[in-house]
Amino acid sequence: MKKILIMIAAALLVVGTACTKADFEDAYPDPSKISTTTVEKQYSGFLSSNREYVLPYYWNYFVVLRTTLTRYTQAVGWVNSGGQYVPGEAGIGAYWETYYNLMAQYRELEKVYNATPADDQATKRIYMITAAIYLYDHTQKLVDLHGDIPFSEAGMVSTNGGDYEASLPKYDKAEDVYSKMLDDLKAFADELNTISVQSAIQTGFKNQDFINGGDLDKWKMYCNSLRLRMLTRVSGTSAFQSRANTEIAAILGNPSSYPVVADNDHNIQINVSNQNSPINSQQFQTGLEDWNGNLASQAMIDHMLANADPRLRAMYEPGAEAGGVYAGLDPLLLSNAQQTLLDAGTVTIYNRSTLSRNDYFPGMLINAAEVSFLKAEYYLNSGNDGAAKAAYNDGISQSVKNYYYFRSLSNDNVAGDLTPTDDSEITAYTAMNQMD
Amino acid sequence: MALILFCSWQFVLAQKTITGTVTDAKDGSTIPGVNVLVKGTTTGTTTDLDGVYSIKAGSGQTLYFHFIGYTDQNVVVGAEATINVKLEPSMEQLQEVVVTALGISREQKALGYAVTSIDSKDLTKTGTTSFATALYGKAPGVRIAQTPGGSTSAVNINIRGVNSITGRNQPLIVVDGVPIRDGEVKNNDYWNDQRLRGNGLLDINPEDIDNISILKGASAAALYGSEAVNGVVLITTKSGKGTKGWSVDLYSTYSADKIAYLPRYQTERGAGAPLNVSNGGQDEAGFIYYDTDGDGVKETRGILGYSINFGPKFDGKPTMAWDGVIRPYENQEDNYSNLFQTGLNSSTTVAMTHANESSNIRLSVTHQDNKGVSLGSENVKNIANLNSSFKLGKNYTVDLVMNYINQKVTNRPYSIDRLTNNFGGMMGRFDNGDWYLGKYKTSKGYRFVTVKGTQSLTPDENIIYNGMRGDIADFMWRVKENNSIENSNRLIGSLTNTWQITEGLKLRGRIATDYTNRGTENSNTSEIPLAFGYSGSFGLESYQNNIRYGDIMLMYMKKVTQDIEIGAMVGYTGQKETGTSMSRGTSDGLSTENLFDLAASVNTPGSGSSRYAIVKDAVLGTINGNYKNYLFVEGTLRNDRTSTMNPNNNSFFYPSVNSSFVFSEAFTMPAAISYGKFRASWGIVGNYPDMYSANIAYSQNTLGVQAVGGKPVLYTTIPGNMGNDAIRPEQKHEYEFGLETKFFVNRLGFDIAYYNGLIKDQILPLTIPTSSGATSVLTNIGTLRNQGIEIALSGTPVLTTNFKWDVQLNFSKNKNVVEKLASGSDELLHADYDGNAAQLISKVGEPMGDFYSHPVKLDANGGKIVNPDGLYQVDADTMVKIGNAMPKAVGGFINSFTYKGFTLEALVDFRFGGYVMPTALNWMTSRGLTEISTTAMDKEHGGLSYYGTTDANGNAINVQTDGATGPNGEKVYDDGILQEGVKADGTPNDYIASSAYYYWNVYNWGGPQYSYSRYELYIVENSYIKMRELSLTYALPVNVAKKIGAKNISLSVFGRNLFYFYRTIKDMDAEAATAGSRWFQQVNNVGTNPSTRTFGGALRVGF
């Protein structure tokens, strides 16, 4: 009897410690992650995955832009040094990788969408159209920076079940990427005019779409404005010239079917509404101001001073020791001389209240000023000088007002109160010699 | 060396030949092979097959008889010529047993693989607070490295090199047969965690350890399967076994840690720079002046507020320091050490044992109190250990082992990252830690305020003079005012039942737990008055970890014939580890100053949580046999499952075989050879992937409400680091040969092992082009090989009645090679430092961890190009290998001298090879703080004279001169350095650089696109020979001890980490870069805590 009891005790020990297959299955996945998602949630994940390159975040401004585009365009002034035009890997790679993360999230969205039943796919079509528009906006930027890029086969490793050797994508020719995008966007422009979104779907879409708040009209404007930008971009090439002229004419000639962003109220941008959410602009300050990344270039300041640009006081502020005098940094000075100017505190900097310390600065995608300038370029090339000038002046006005609008969002006043502008000041500016 | 010493002494006495027969006292049979030694000499022999010996000895000398399994016997030689001896069979002599996998004790000679066994007395000689730090140099093939910071900082153990390229590198720790929580740490991640963390092995009290077995090879550890690729450390705690009646032991130790091995600071000059290098408004002499009395005249001398220290030389004249005190302008000795305190450690253990026929118990209680060098840090531990065994009836035994650790850690050491890896925190020479202690807070208790006129309740106290390093003041504020109190309780307990079913058949079952519960309170003092804003914070954290473990084993042993014995075992083990952590903290400051509670949160308190679970189990079996007790073979097989792999693909087999042949028992050996054994083994062990890394799942999060009237925007993303459901464990296939010999009646011993391990299926997050849709995919792709030798040499060169000298040399050499990486890729990037300044890469055909950096640019003829500013041009387009991070050889050299009651023991440990990149040290050079940065600082230091001008292209250049001024009256400076090389036009370089400019720029931060820094100079070999432990012990004579009722009393003084005999990096402790559990966290960061040197004393009393 005693031995039997002992054997039972031993058996109990085994049972008590033995693991079942269910134990292993339960412990395999991370409990804080989920194994399935929905079109809605993945859509927002896709849109937000490159938010740090749409809103003014630190890395984009300090690492990427400070040593690359803002220098190449003389948007900023800087102290000369050796190899100053050679971009570091960090400046190039970060932007590239962010784009392909966006692409990976887009492919995942496609994968989730394709796995839903066909009738659900039909009702959720709006998600795919708008996602593609947003993807193409950023694809165009990457093509413009790099030329040929992996596109048609890119981002497929998850779709291919992790087979990374089968997922190494080919490079598509820049022209082919443009053609594909232009074809698709044209089709979207028409489809958006006819699509009907069930109200149940629209409710969810309105919430998940933090760019346009589910506003289909704004998506139409985004789509057509984007077409305008892309067509203008390639309008000088023989391959696209005739297509560009035809399609731009079609867009501008039929604003009811193909609306574009025509005033600042319709700017396509990500608004900052909640400082405690990941959609904010709090890193703008360090991103722009660190290492004197916010110095004004001489070209900008000289031009704005000479023409009494109403944006000057909104965009810039004089150096701390400059006695209120605006002065950009001369790029032709030796670095020692530049550094001395810097140390003396006389160089103009970007307006901290309007820009870098404006926690509500929106993430800009397409605005009315840009569209007006695109129109002006088209009219000018097609010999319609009057329309070109009108569009150009519209653009100036929209741009000026936009900067004052940015300042109105700001919660910072370190740069001092901003004297408002008015139409007469803008008109005077557009009438200046260099502007006329 | 030991061999030479053997020959160095002789006794000259009247010698005669003595013969005799040695027999078994019980059955009267003769015993062959008994060691017979004339005590105090090298003279020795062994008995022949008939038990007969013959030896030369003089009257009065002592003959010593030794044979395994019998009690030693001493016989004093008299007039007789024949001495017959009867040896008593001894239970004690069977002690040459070793604890092996799963806690099974086996005879040392039966093992076909290398096991290093370390006895308790070798762990406690110098009062180390952790058993792991007591292992330096004591086991061949084992490398120890501790993160500086004191008793709460993690200790790394590396066995036979590094076995995983990116995975775990730490061995499995098993206490009394039960795997315990150890945990990995990462102490180089300042921005996520400012305090230095420890690992679980620190909780095991060295005083409670009876012995440690280190299972190094795959065969030794094969029964631990996929947990054993890094080896296994088996700890057996002390018990009452083998004692009788009551005994009580008292052990008390006290020691102090002093900061040591700081860089060699320059002592000649303060902050600033020569005018021609940087003009910050200083005068020709390098000073600036303040108007302190408000008369409009700037009359008080001060220094520039620069972080670089190429300023004026110390002249002892009155100068304004940043704290507003005018002091002689002098080098401040020990200024950096003044930011810290002396660490004080004490530990007292009282242990009671009681044993009788049916039970034995050991109960010990330990109180430890350790203050680290970080201000305000203290670690108080109470440890209770119960180890008991009860016989229930004739065939049934119950063992109960409980280890309870109650710990209160106040302010874990604060990382000094901001003082080393940061220019703003590097203390100049005219600056002092003491000044910060007085100024880091205002008289009203708020954080210091800088700049005249800045809002403060005490504007007069604002720091307005140059020279304060803001990051040091900030460090001081954080160390003193951010308080963190951790209370934890840990219970490691096991219950083992053993049933001897019949003769030779045994059933053993065990359940065990390792449970930890820890609560932390973080209180950060308010920094500014409430009227100016909210500051300060309070947070609560709780952490629980629980390991449940169980095993059951059926063991069988039978003698088949007179000569052949076989055994077999089958068993099952299962283990589940779960953990949760939760935290909650105030948000946006405290609503009432210094009210430390969540209720004081200005906004809704924030929170965080995580949880995890790992499940493992295994079925295992062994079969073994021996022939005549001198030829042994054993085979083992384990099949295990782990939850970190796909449940449909998580079952793997781990076989091993090993054999040992004790040739000294099989054959008659020459008299000099007392023992000889050859061993060979082969086995497979593994390393499973990190928890949750294989599974592919979406991250879910929220963007919050983004529109008026909207709902929170929930979103998912697919991670950029793809998992892999088909992942397999890393597998090490290793074979090993060894030879163990003892000579001259065990006076000299050799143990040599060769091993060769191939670690296949390395789990790597393979980097793929991001355009594929992920940044990396988890793959089984690399192959690694570790091969090496381990030598243990021990000897007793001198053995006389009163004096004994023991020597032990442990040496191991490991060669690591990456044999394969991904197809189409022959390198793996581990880290890119400081904007492509340097890289840590593993390449096929090389050992893991090559440091690459940019060389100096060469022109077409191979000349080093010098820029007009006098510095070499760094080649931004190429990187070359500078050194490899893997140490080549490690070991220890132990000497022990005993004279009467005194024992002096000295342990030297060493490491050869292995490069590190201590960037912070070089940045100190860039700040002009190290001795090397004074090179050429003036004529006396070898500086060249030059004047500054402009060349035809408008470049500012310096031209060497002998004149008192330049040709156009330019000022002449005397701190010139000339680099050997060529100018852009190919002519020999004559551009002079100012020494200050040179050191400032060549040792600066950043890759070629950011700076002129030459990181190739930062990457240096880290070899050393160190006086690790020195102890002197005096055991009082027994009759003195008896007077106070004790059985024995001993007193000792000791020192640890005392000095270097040799080191390649003179400006830091060789272990300063140890900042995490994985190898690549141990090569770069020197921002943990200062290293220390320890002195102490101990008292041991047995009743």
Image: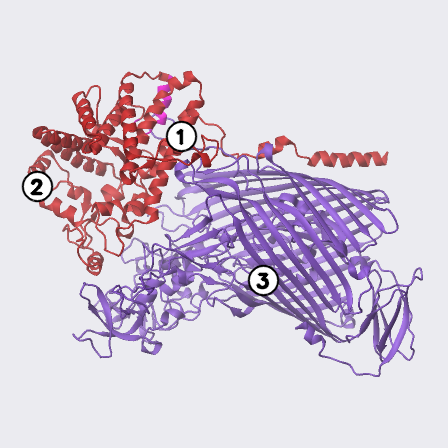
Chain colours: A red, B purple
Binning the other alpha carbons within 10 Å of mark 1 as few (below 14), some (14 to 19) or many (20 upward) gives many
State which chain disc 1 sits on: A
| Direction front: furthest residue | B861
Q: Quadrant of the N terminus of chain B?
A: bottom right
**Can you tell which of label 2 and label 1 is closer to the viewer?**
1
Residue A434 marker: 2
**Is A333 on the left or on the right of A107, as rendered?**
left
Binning the other alpha carbons within 10 Å of mark 2 as few (below 14), some (14 to 19) or many (20 upward) gives few
Q: Decide: is B817 above or below B438.
A: above
State which chain disc 2 sits on: A
Residue pointed to by mark 3: B890
Prevailing secondary structure class for the magenta stretch in the rendered image: helix
State which chain disc 3 sits on: B
Look at label 1 and name its amino acid. Answer: Arg
- Dot 1 falls on a residue whose secondary structure is helix
3D distance between C-alphas at marks 2 and 1: 48 Å
| Direction right: furthest residue | B28
Is A208 inside the magenta-drawn segment? yes
What x and y, as percent, mark residue B410? Answer: 53, 53
